[in-house]
Image: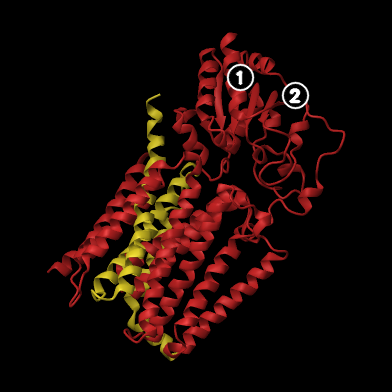
Amino acid sequence: MLGSFVNLAYLLGATSFVWGLRQLSTPDTARKGNLLAAFGMGIAIIATLLLPMTGAANNYAWIIGGMLVGGIIGFFAAKKVQMTAMPQMVSIFNGLGGACAVVLAMTELVHYYDGTAQMSGGQLFIVLTTLLIGAIAFTGSMLAFAKLQGLVWDSQVTLPKHHIVNYILLAATIALTAYVYMGGVALGMTMAIALMVLSLVYGFSFVAPIGGADMPVVISLLNSFTGLSAAAAGLIYDNNIMLVGGILVGAAGVILTVLMCEAMNRSLFNVLIGGFGGGAAAAKGVDGDQVAKTVTINDAAIQLFYSQSVMIVPGYGLAVAQAQKLVKELDDLLSNNGVDVKYAIHPVAGRMPGHMNVLLAEADVPYPKLLDLEDANEKIPNTDMVVIIGANDVVNPAALDEPSSPIYGMPVLNVWEAKHVIVMKRSMSPGYAGIQNQLFFHEKNKMLFGDAKASLQKLVSEIKTL
Amino acid sequence: MESILQFIDSNLIMIYLLVFTIILGFEVISKVPTVLHTPLMSGANAISGVVIIGAIILIRNAAPDDLLTLSLGTLGVILGMINVVGGYAVTDRMLEMFKKKKKS
């Protein structure tokens, strides 16, 4: 009787996952979709607590204790995190999911080797798969976090010929998995631990050569891995909702990864090989005699104030400086003077697709003012002033006319087609992809050096005096 | 070969479930505006925390004096719960900001 209810609850939970994901992919229903998926998870967890098990000791105190501790940590981490640090947070959460799968698989293996549990060949295979994928997702996500947080730089963790190292590690990991599988129960726990360590190392090494700018794509892919490890764990416990939820996330993660790569006009393979911004890119530096023109705050303020139309191109620099509210203030001042202010959002502006929209929404920038790449490029030729705040690679003309550039082929905002361009930037240093930007030397462009927040602050006070 | 075919025969429903879920996963989010990539990834990430179910089952099945399993299982529950609760909460925070747009 109770068993049937649990099964129905699982069905309801799984349906909520599917429907929640569906709603999450449309702006109007996205929030409801997330709540629905959370509801589904709640149902699934409660059902699992009630699931009839013959002869089970239950140990509810341990479970509830763990849920409270984890729930509180997760809740406060999510509430406290800065909007700019969202991508890192998602990466950590994802890594912990992978770690959970590793813990499950290792516990099963302990019982297998000490003889308290029997496993068929198929079951052993599933447990090893869970271990392998979960471990890669765990260390990979943690490194992705460290890279996004700026704790680790690409060059510190990349060996020469790193992709060859990765192939060797992958081959070794698969070989060891096969060995442990073939060896059966006689092999003992030591080899299982060795396999865990090797998988953890591979996860780290897998992410190491991938450029920091590509971390969102990697997180999405690792998210897919966590889903697959959850699905594999679902096979261990013969649990349908783990299987369905895991596979669903696995498949959705792959599609999302591909969509993200498409937004950057790069193939997944190209992203995974890494080396973005290395080697050939460095050769294409600045020619010695090129000088970028600068603009004073005063001139910039006047130009902006008396323009017909202004387009703001926000980048990660804006996000780091926490200056989105100042941008909104600038926008209000200009709009009150009848200037048509729009925002051009490149698909990969910020550190994740959609990240910039979240930041601007936080500053109450009205949604219709945000233009996507195509709309923005259409409007730019009729725009008086383009103001680029902390963005670089997404406005680099090299993507169009420099076949040797690593970002060649990526769609960019054609800001040089506007009448005037102002780049607000800390210095002339190259962008995240590590390449110089010819836009800075363009005849229409003027530089406004300084911290994004400080410059915006000065600009706003200057405009107020006009 | 024989054993593989036998495996397919005896797990037919399971295989149907796998295949259809994969198709469903592909289809359900095939058309997402770029704006929603980050929240969607975050929401999907929360769902992958479903692995916590396994940790709960593990603890429930453990003997009360099997401290190793209980500790590892509890560790699993903690890790999974952070993924689940944190994942949904962070997604909600992101999406909350899209809502405010109508006010201003």
Q: Please identify the quarter of the rendering in which residue A218 is found.
A: bottom right
Residues beneath discs 2 and 1 located on the same chain: yes
* Residue that badge 2 annotates: A294
Viewed as shown, does residue A166 lie left or right of B44?
Answer: right
Q: Position of residue A129 (x, y in %)?
A: 45, 74
Amino acid type assigned to the residue bearing label 1 in the image: Lys
Q: Which chain is red?
A: A
Which marked residue is nearer to the observer: mark 2 or mark 1?
A: 1
Q: Residue A81 at what x, y percent from top left? A: 44, 42
**Tag 2: amino acid:** Thr
Q: Which residue is rendered at x = 36% and y = 51% of the image?
A: A73
User: Horizontal placement of A267 versus A250: left or right?
Assistant: right
Residue situated furthest right in the rendering: A289
Q: Colour of chain B?
A: yellow
Estimate how packed mark 2 is, as few (under 14), some (14 to 19) or many (20 or more) residues with alpha carbons within 10 Å.
some
The answer to which quarter of the image holds residue A103 is bottom left
Viewer-proximal residue among B47 and A247: B47
Check disc 1 and report the residue beneath it: A458
Instruction: Tell which subunit mark 2 falls on.
Output: A
Residue A251, compared with residue A421, is above or below; it is below
Q: Mark 1 falls on what kind of element?
A: helix
Q: Position of residue A47 (x, y in %)?
A: 22, 62
